[in-house]
Image (spheres, grey):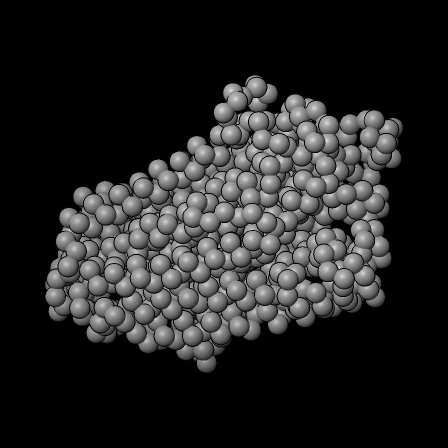
Amino acid sequence: MGTSTILSDLGTEIIIPICAVVGIIFSLFQWYLVSQVKLSLEKPSADDKNGYTEALIEEEEGINDHTVVQKCAEIQTAISEGATSFLMTEYQYVGIFMVIFAVLIFVFLGSVESFSTSSKVCTYDTTKMCKPALMTAVFSTVSFILGAVTSVISGFLGMKIATYANARTTLEARKGVGKAFIVAFRSGAVMGFLLAANGLLVLYITINLFKIYYGDDWEGLFESITGYGLGGSSMALFGRVGGGIYTKAADVGADLVGKVERNIPEDDPRNPAVIADNVGDNVGDIAGMGSDLFGSYAESSCAALVVASISSFGINHEFTAMMYPLIVSSVGILVCLITTLFATDFFEVKTVKQIEPTLKNQLIISTILMTIGVALVSWVALPSSFTIFNFGTQKVVKNWQLFLCVCVGLWAGLIIGFVTEYYTSNAYSPVQDVADSCRTGAATNVIFGLALGYKSVIIPIFAIAVSIFVSFTFAAMYGVAVAALGMLSTIATGLAIDAYGPISDNAGGIAEMAGMSHRIRERTDALDAAGNTTAAIGKGFAIGSAALVSLALFGAFVSRAEITTVDVLTPKVFIGLIVGAMLPYWFSAMTMKSVGKAALKMVEEVRRQFNEIPGLMEGTAKPDYATCVKISTDASIKEMIPPGALVMLTPLIVGILFGVETLSGVLAGSLVSGVQIAISASNTGGAWDNAKKYIEAGVSDHAKSLGPKGSDAHKAAVIGDTVGDPLKDTSGPSLNILIKLMAVESLVFAPFFATHGGLLFKIFE
């Protein structure tokens, strides 16, 4: 069946690693450009463009330039040290968990054929012999560890570049908003490209190394690769939850005491929680987000590869067609590279008004270019017709149909991004309505914000539904997997835009703490406001892709566990469905309460310092930042374990006690309710945050009538923002990992559950 592909196998083996290496080189070049902004006090030569030869605002106002640079460098060091020490502590705990889970994978999968070392008959082609289950257990464990380590490194490198760039962005803001924008955006690009290229390269090398042992047994080879996705996502879960609790405990504590009680600005150096707040942006929004999107990428690739391995690509050993998901990602890196140049080199941002359109154009340009790229890849890397495994039968698919599957995911991502932007940007009426509701107090603000969040779910869900229908109709579960991959194919650009937000936020904080003029603060605020919206767009992408990824993983799980149909009307499945739908609520309750508990300690500590340290409010004494950093660190490490355990243990308990049918119900239920809660939580939080910023900025007449800072309407907006913080930065974004992680874990353990699962039902039979 099927004709050979235009692109040769050798061509594929050259293209994938080259694209990955190009991505890594590009990100290092961007890092080099960012490093050209000096944070030291040496006097540069007269021709040095980054020196003090250009007219700077500070000099016009007669403030000594050296002291400003020195202060910025000191603050940056404090933030960087805080973030590094938190991640190191977190990784120690996560490392212990990783070892325990790796042992579990080996024991459970090895016991499927009771640790036999003899070959077995292949599941899908009974005329051939496959490698023993014991080796699948070994290789799955290895790929789990590789995925986990890659995920941790991705998050850590992202945090490093962000803490390296924040003060540099602040210093560049003295020369104009355009210069500051380029530094922040380039730093985001470093993270985006490192992550996309690393993920692709490690996966590609792993497949090639495993192939040396597996040879022709592609079914076993790609089954063991699924551990890579599991490793990536399980690290992301702890990174997201731990980082989210950290950042919000500090943020809520700093806001409630600083802004509401003491009426001082958000990033005032007198506020003891201010360093912890800035550290939190880096560990939650950057390290956590990086691991999260890496997990999505790894899982969608794994889901596509598993389904393809039991289709004609795998049965006929067509290497190029088999690697189609990786070739799409490779082209994605090149497309994002060209797209990035539009923001930094082809066009220059000169005014505040150009910031948001420039960021939005990144999404549009990358999507259009990627559509052309996917068309090319589908033409050269796929046979004109082939078969795809579809629940026990083989379905004939044409290469143009697969092209449409990838595109429907790609464009659905863009739609979700723009809907998210409409509901969370203060340039549009939804957020302005929320801001307006603050006139009558916090209660109406909360009501309007919740309504906005619920309403914002409608269009994204239709976009996801349409993409599922189209992709499944054309190419069964493989279509859904490549649609998810399409949504993530421009991951480098998405992450660059996303990481730009926290970097700008930190830059504003540093400007405030270093005592820079209000004109610079206005510039960093403008960068930050645009970053807030783009962060919401990034979360929208992450949630949308999680929905598609987990459906694709669900399909792969059902195939692996040899379930022919999932019948909702059987009690076994229905109880799973209803329990699965409850899990996101349980998980959100845990994460939000954790933020509340940690914030409570933080508020008490900040109040204590204001009351007990003489001269703190007057600015003559220094606050004790370290204690606040410690409170956030301790709370988040302790509190991230129960939600993490809930997600990781549920599939194991359900699979062992109730079997694969009930587990399929749990996965479907958690997917359906998790996506809705995740979208509404992150959009509600984003809208409240930007409603507060809308009042603070006071740009329009309407905003001026609600302000200024400290007015009753502003206080109501701050309360809304504080309620929204854990929604948008802790429970909302962590939910998409819950959805994916349970699905990929079930897939990895499917052979074990199918053989030994359902103990309780066996007793009653």
Q: Can residue 414 be seen by looking at this rendering?
A: yes
Q: What is the x, y in percent for residue 195? A: 41, 44
Q: Which residue is drawn at 79% across and 46% down?
A: 259
Q: Which residue is drawn at 62% across and 72% down?
A: 455
Q: Which of 370 and 329 is in front in this view?
A: 370
Instruction: Name the image quarter holding residue 69.
Output: top right
Q: What is the x, y in percent for residue 739? A: 49, 60
In the picture provided, is 430 more to the left or to the right than 366?
A: right
Total count of labels? 0
Q: What is the x, y in percent for residue 530? A: 59, 53
Residue 695 in the image: above or below residue 670:
above
Q: Nearer the viewer, residue 576 or 759?
A: 576
Q: Quadrant of the N terminus?
A: bottom left
Q: Residue at x 68, y 29 (%)?
A: 59
In the picture provided, is 347 more to the left or to the right than 314?
A: right
Q: Residue at x 60, y 37 (%)?
A: 175
Residue 463 in the image: above or below residue 601:
below
In the picture provided, is 136 more to the left or to the right than 522?
A: left
Point out the residue furthest to the bottom here.
569
